[in-house]
Image: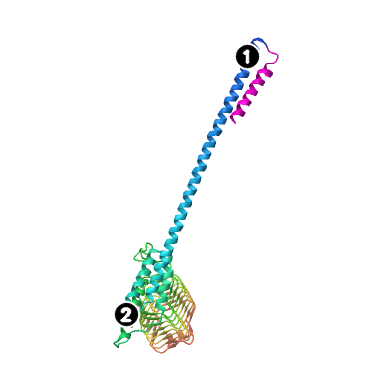
Amino acid sequence: MAAAIAAATLALTVWLWWAGTAGLSGDKLVTARLDALRTGLSFGLGGGGLFALYLAWRRQHSTEVGLRQKERDQEDVARAYELQREDSLAKRITELYTKAVEQLGSDKAPVRLGGLYALERLAQDHAEQRQTIVNVLCAYLRMPFTLPDATEGAEHRESAQEREVRITAQRILAHHLAPGRDPDNPDATFWSDIDLDLTRAILIDFDLTRCRVREAQFSGANLIDADLGSVTFTGNAWFDDAIFTNRANFGDVTFTGRAHFVDATFTGSVRLLGATFTDRAYFNRATFAGNAWFDDATFASRANFDNATFADRARFLEATFTGAAYFNHANFTDGARFTGATFIGEARFDKAAFTGEAQFDGVTFRQGVPPEIEQLISS
């Protein structure tokens, strides 16, 4: 490149020296040749400067290419290290998970308890594993179980120990499904967006007070002394064919999705005081053997109590039915109190049976008083 610039400079100078001075003489010849020499040298210097700039650019470009390649090499090393770390972590999680699940299959209660706590730690440390581990805990609670009886012996002791293991599993679930005092700033131990599948499970002293659950499946479950007060179900909740043994508390519960209690049986009293049903509520063919209290409950959509049986007192004081309310063929054996209730949508009590006292004082029927209720009020 330098030789080419020198040759071009020489050629330009020679051409200007001879061709540019042809026919001149004296001072004009000297001046013209000096100008030619000056022009040639300027061209040479300019070309040299351009060549120097080119060389500088080449060096800079080469340096930048080298730096970029070095950065890519470092990124490749970091990526390989990260993949290796993730692979090691995944293997470690799998090992811990497998060992904990194996502990749950032990015939010794303390070993099973250790498996539960190991799974809890694993879920707390790795959020992506929480739903899977909750599924394992629910599957354990769905396993067949015989309640301990009053007799003594090895079978009684084993059943009593297994009951404690199951109660521990329930408490782990309740602890991590509770967002704490401020749901907008939940506790670090809260596991959000969790589904529960406790179909046909036997749940003893089941307490989910102030918990937050997404989809919940309790169909066919036996809930013994259940407390679900102030629970928020953000998805559908299924309690079809469930048996609530002894008391059941649903005070201030919120069902954001549908609430299904079709064919459910409440052997003791049930409290749904202040309950909120945002979507449809189904209590078709439900059996309430004890007191059933729905005071201040809000049914924002359809409420269906068709063919429900209320063997003891039924109370719907100040309850609000925004959507249609169906009590067709419902059987109220020991009194029904709807004092102060509001029926904004259609209210149907076709062939409902009121064996005991029925109170409808201060009830508001926006769509008109049903004939059966009008007959009760006037009699």
Q: Which of marks 2 and 1 is nearer the N terminus?
A: 1
- Badge 1 is on which residue? 31
Q: Residue drawn at (60%, 31%), measured in percent from left and top?
A: 1
Position of 34 compared to 265: left or right? right
15 or 251, nearer to the observer: 15
Q: Residue drawn at (62%, 17%), measured in percent from left and top?
A: 35
Residue 344 is situated, as x and y percent measured from the top left of the image, at 47, 75
The magenta stretch is 1-24
Farthest residue to the top: give it: 26
Residue 340 is situated, as x and y percent measured from the top left of the image, at 39, 77
Farthest residue to the front: give it: 3
Residue 11 is situated, as x and y percent measured from the top left of the image, at 65, 23
Q: What element carries label 1?
A: helix
Residue kind at label 2, given as amino acid type: Gln
72 or 254, nearer to the observer: 72
- Badge 2 is on which residue? 161
CA distance for labels 2 and 1: 118 Å
353 or 139, nearer to the observer: 139
Q: Can residue 44 be seen in this view?
A: yes
